[in-house]
Amino acid sequence: MELAAQIKKIVEQHLPDESLYVVKVDAKGARRLKVLIILDGDNGVTIEQVTKVSREVGHELDERDLIKDDEYQFEVTSAGIGEPLELHRQYVKNVDRKITVTRNNETKFTGTLKEVKEESILIDAEITEKGKKKVTIKEMEIPFNDIDNTVVEVSFK
């Protein structure tokens, strides 16, 4: 089993409750290994939760001597604003929020995420005709395998 997968199993054992989940574990680096663990939660993630997971996982990694490098960088963080959605569960968490979807063919659509299905998402896309200011809403179903990335738009309203 590769290192990132082993670390992910350890992290999952130290999550404080089932509302938290691992978005991504990266373990890479040429001269110095960098381990990055990104967490998210159905109700967000607190700094206390990140700190607790960081301490417990760091302790277990040292105890198991899983990482052979004498020096490595280790970071546990929450999924940040502007980071692309990675998991189906993250899409579900963001229903009714404004998102920008970039498809594999590089076309972009911004709109409200209305529904998350097993294989696709449904958005009310904001369509603006060239040279006009009027925005029309068009319901679109976009299959996950056609999505390059999706970012939640930040609103300060």
Image (cartoon, rainbow, N blue to C red):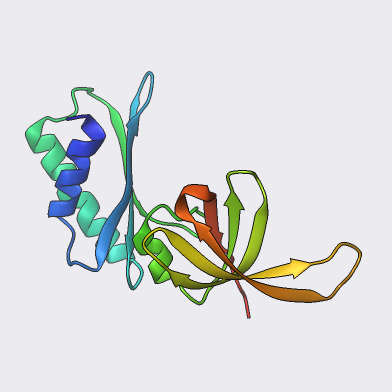
User: Residue visible at 52% across and 50% down?
Assistant: 147
Nearer the observer, 51 or 101 = 101
Whole-percent x, y for residue 86 in the image: 41, 52
Looking at the image, which residue sits at the far bottom? 157
Determine which quarter of the picture holds residue 139: bottom right
**In which quadrant will I find the N terminus?**
top left
The image shows residue 99, relative to residue 1, as above or below, that is: below
**In which quadrant will I find the C terminus?**
bottom right
User: Residue visible at 35% across and 23% down?
Assistant: 32
User: Residue visible at 33% across and 66% down?
Assistant: 45
The answer to whether residue 78 is visible is yes
User: Residue visible at 60% across and 51% down?
Assistant: 102
Whole-percent x, y for residue 64 in the image: 8, 34
Whole-percent x, y for residue 37 in the image: 31, 46
Looking at the image, which residue sits at the far left? 63
The image shows residue 86, relative to residue 61, as above or below, that is: below
In this picture, residue 98 sits left or right of residue 91:
right
The answer to whether residue 82 is visible is no
In this picture, residue 77 sits left or right of residue 11:
right
Nearer the observer, 32 or 2 = 2
In this picture, residue 31 sits left or right of residue 19:
right
Whole-percent x, y for residue 39 in the image: 32, 55
Determine which quarter of the picture holds residue 51: bottom left
Looking at the image, which residue sits at the far top? 31
The image shows residue 94, relative to residue 53, as above or below, that is: below
Q: How many marks?
A: 0
